[in-house]
Amino acid sequence: MRTSAFIIGVSLVLAAAVFGRFFYDSRVADNTIRVTGAATRPFSADIVKWRISVGRSAGLSGLSSGYSLLRSDHDALVRFLSANAVPETCISVQPVNRTYNYDRDGNVTGYTLSQNFDVVSSDVATITKLALNPDQLYEKGVALQNSNLEYYLSNLPAIKKELIAEATRDARARAEAIAKNSGARLGRIGSARAGVFQITEPFSTEVTDYGIYSTSTRDKHVTITVTATFGLH
């Protein structure tokens, strides 16, 4: 009987201790504040990619001449870039792509030959100027199908670190303002979680849950949010 009473007594003490600890943890967990800080900065891209596509059409019996014309376009384009101080190391050339042309009855009438070029350079101003003024290429007979510019930030990892730190400081400043107005004192940070990066063109309101990396403009705005939890005293 004494043994049973002793076991029951110990169980009650342990239960009280566990409940007390749970109650304490719950009160501590409730004594927190969660805020979201944000940081946005403007940046100018220092890497440009110029995507170029040239193409030729050929009849059923003119495939060989079509390839020859496309080769002439290739050589003229490379010479044009070289003459404008763009080294060949910046130029990436893809294999020729061939597709069939059909009439309305589904009969093959010929071929379309195309080839893609990527020019990647840190000389953003020069490449942009060349892309926006293609007259010289047309004068040389180069059959441009498509021309598109994409702008990138080479130092994006460093930018991300800076903005995460800035957004965290902003979160703390917001939490301090809330704590001060409520008569509390802000404690240590308990947790922090960074959101996704939104890299957009200036004055854009576009955001997505998985982030954005807009490459359409040289000037960009990079935005990040940090959700942080702080203790209150």
Image: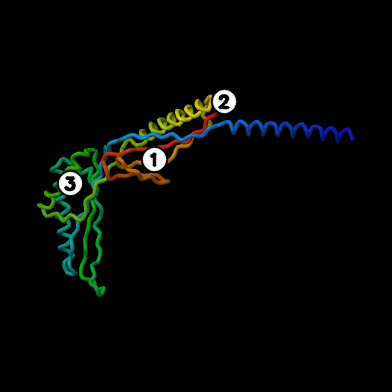
In the image, what residue type sits under mark 3?
Leu
Q: Specify few, some or many for label 2: CA neighbours under 10 Å numbering under 14, 14-19, or 20 or more.
A: few
Q: Specify few, some or many for label 1: CA neighbours under 10 Å numbering under 14, 14-19, or 20 or more.
A: many
Residues under labels 2 and 3: Cα distance? 60 Å
Determine contact: label 1, label 3, CB under 8 Å.
no
In the image, what residue type sits under mark 2?
His
**Percent x, y of residue 18:** 71, 33
Looking at the rendered structure, the secondary structure element under dot 1 is loop
Looking at the rendered structure, the secondary structure element under dot 2 is loop
* Tag of residue 197: 1
In the image, what residue type sits under mark 1?
Phe
Location of residue 166 (image quadrant): top left
Kindly identify the residue that appears in the image at 52 percent across and 30 percent down.
230
Which numbered disc flags the more N-terminal residue, 1 or 3? Answer: 3
Q: Name the residue carrying label 2.
A: 233
Which numbered disc flags the more N-terminal residue, 2 or 3? Answer: 3
Residues under labels 2 and 1: Cα distance? 33 Å
Q: Name the residue carrying label 3.
A: 132
Q: Specify few, some or many for label 3: CA neighbours under 10 Å numbering under 14, 14-19, or 20 or more.
A: few
Kindly identify the residue that appears in the image at 40 percent across and 46 percent down.
208
Q: How many marks?
A: 3
